[in-house]
Amino acid sequence: MARTRSVPYRKVTPISLFSPEDEIFAQGERAGSIYRVEFGAVRVYRLNSDGRRQVVAFHLAGEMFGLEAGATHSFFADALVQTGLTQAGLPDEISPELLMLALRSMIRAQEHLLVICRQSAVEKLVAFLMDMVERQGGLEQIDLPMSRIDIGEYLGMSIETVSRSFSKLRDEGLLRFHGARKVELLDIETLKRLCR
Amino acid sequence: MARTRSVPYRKVTPISLFSPEDEIFAQGERAGSIYRVEFGAVRVYRLNSDGRRQVVAFHLAGEMFGLEAGATHSFFADALVQTGLTQAGLPDEISPELLMLALRSMIRAQEHLLVICRQSAVEKLVAFLMDMVERQGGLEQIDLPMSRIDIGEYLGMSIETVSRSFSKLRDEGLLRFHGARKVELLDIETLKRLCR
DNA sequence: CGCGCATTTGATAGCCATCAACCTCTGTGG
DNA sequence: CCACAGAGGTTGATGGCTATCAAATGCGCG
């Protein structure tokens, strides 16, 4: 969906490496850089006051993130798997491309909203899968760099419901698993119809 | 929350008037203007492919909306009540203020996401009320320019559940109604605690 | 005053969160 | 090479919340 390769970098750093769970930035920290995922995957989340985590976004290779409205980050970001990032300060001139990045992030958040509201568990999961397919180049076999917990926190449902929904789709012959983190989509047409 | 008065206008039009249900722009229409609500209230929504409506945002007096990522609008917008809008073309130069408007819209969308996910019906409704209070200047008496249907479509719940949640809060002595569209908040501290 | 629509209230069923137990995979150490 | 431990994932059972259908009530407006 929101491809973000077109935003120009200034002072691009060498690739820095992050292991799973390594923090990239924390809520409240001073912002001012944008990041690009060179390889691996990132999750962006927020902690509610009662300690529950809400995953706001995942970012895959080629995508950019880290733009903030204020001087400080409103979210946490960490690596899901071995991940390489480059980092750049914001350009002095606010470029049209930067504005586009912000607007696309907004659209993505609103799309996410549409998915989460008023959809059943299976529908949400299918929408998530279709999004992942698109962002991984449309191949029928996709990697899920995130755990079931992450998926649940992203879609607003329990891990058990995530798992049960996967099983349901598998039993209906729509998915095939190769381990828990590799999925093959067996009938993309039917799946597309499922997410309305 | 996202006050948007600071974005500078170019070629501000005279106030145009909209009656309830009057369309301001439609999904797919050519975008390129931003709007400011001079008085009244606006709802921004999207129609799912199955015809259900998802309300993405409400905009009250003093707020701006209509910024788009692409050349065309991704959403519909119409007036909830008698509403006056001014309109301006986008500045040629992309101003920092415009970027801020985009970023604040993004943050607002993500906040909305946090409210809708993983919160009970009453919690969502309280969060909605607290947002409305803040945007109406913090007074304890607030107007709801939108119907129960709109609130339901905004929060992702049925109108019956909206109504029942209102009744619950009323029975607990936290709200008093003066007609269905005027609410008095009787215990803001307790209400704040309720939305976590 | 009375009509029509919005809202509220009631009854019921279904989905999903939760608690619990079991399974699977992976890495480690004997 | 195998046994084991631990984490992540799956499956089962149950209760609660909320969507849905249905009906009553209230309110705005002519």
Image: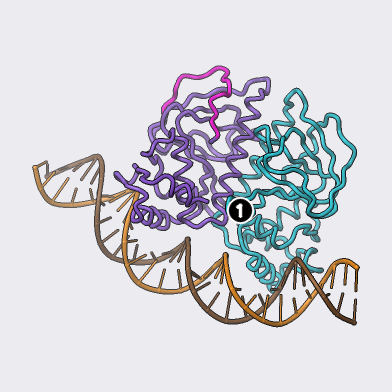
Chain colours: A purple, B cyan, C brown, D orange
B156 with respect to A176 (left or right): right
Residue A85 x, y percent position in the rendering: 46, 27
**Is residue B105 positioned above or below A125 on the image?**
above
Neighbours of disc 1 within 10 Å: few (<14), some (14-19), many (20+): many
Q: Residue at x 82, y 44 (%)?
A: B37
Residue B175, picture quadrant = bottom right
Residue A191 x, y percent position in the rendering: 44, 48
- Of residue B38 and residue C18, the one placed in the foreground of this image is B38
Residue A61, picture quadrant = top left
Residue B136 x, y percent position in the rendering: 79, 52
Q: Residue at x 74, y 41 (%)?
A: B65
- Of residue C9 and residue D14, the one placed in the foreground of this image is C9
The range drawn in magenta is A2-17
**Is residue A25 positioned above or below B196 on the image?**
above
Residue identifier under label 1 = B115
- Of residue A194 and residue B158, the one placed in the foreground of this image is A194
Is residue B137 something that shows in the picture?
no
SS class, disc 1: helix
Q: Label 1 sits on what residue type?
A: Val
